Amino acid sequence: MDKALTRLEKQWVMYDVGNSAFVMLVSTIMPIYFNYLADQGGLSSVQYLAYWGYASSIATLLVALSGPVFGTFSDIKGMKKPLFAAAIAVGALGCAALGFMKQWLLFLVVFVVAKFGYAVSLIFYDSMLTDITEPERMDRVSSSGYAWGYIGSCIPFVACLGIVLGSDSLGISMEMAMTLAFLLTAVWWLCMTLPLL
């Protein structure tokens, strides 16, 4: 019978719980909010979809081009943790900054930066698996991270959804509700990361 997760393995899993909140926000509420900003900026629905697609593609391309370089750095002794922390800072601070971007183009630029930080953090996070567990436990620990990431991301997501959908009841504007949602997600991400750091 498999023994319970060790303290270090649990800390590694917690990072998945933290960063998955950003993924949930990006896949659900954020495109709707960008549509709102684009509409305020006079973009058509066709332009909105095109620009959103361009931004997502640029972030993916940046990671694809820089991934091998960061992957190499993750194998250099003493580089993994500082670069992991820097990537998290870029991603989480970018997430928080999204709440203050009220112009669609600036919003997209910050989104690309935040998504890049998130994706780069995963390069270092995944490479840590060999450092925090034994080879025969890697599948179990990795699948625990995946599962708990999905479960844990629902907590801030439900809170964000409540803030955004209940903004009228709370007496705040849509912009303020989204600012709170981005800040809550960034704080959740950082708090879940601290034990691993």
Image (spheres, helix red, strand yellow):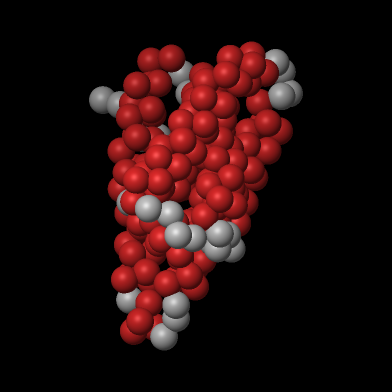
Tally of numbered discs: 0
| Residue 31 visible within the image | no
Residue 24: x and y, percent? Answer: 36, 48
Q: Nearer the viewer, residue 37 or 22?
A: 37
In what quadrant of the picture does the N terminus appear? top left
| Residue 141 visible within the image | yes
Q: Quick check: 39 above or below 69?
A: below
Residue 175: x and y, percent? Answer: 48, 70
Residue lying at the far left in this picture: please name it. Answer: 1
Q: Is residue 97 left or right of residue 148?
A: right
Residue at 38% x, 77% y: name it: 167
Q: Quick check: 65 above or below 44?
A: above
Q: Nearer the viewer, residue 32 or 22?
A: 32
Q: Quadrant of residue 36?
A: bottom left
Residue at 51% x, 50% y: name it: 189
Q: Is residue 151 left or right of residue 111?
A: left
Q: Nearer the viewer, residue 61 or 37?
A: 37
Residue at 53% x, 47% y: name it: 108
In what quadrant of the picture does the C terminus appear? top right
Residue 142: x and y, percent? Answer: 38, 27
Residue lying at the far right in this picture: please name it. Answer: 78
Q: Quadrant of residue 137?
A: top left
Residue 25: x and y, percent? Answer: 40, 52
Residue at 33% x, 76% y: name it: 166
Q: Is residue 81 left or right of residue 191?
A: right
Q: Quick check: 125 above or below 28?
A: above
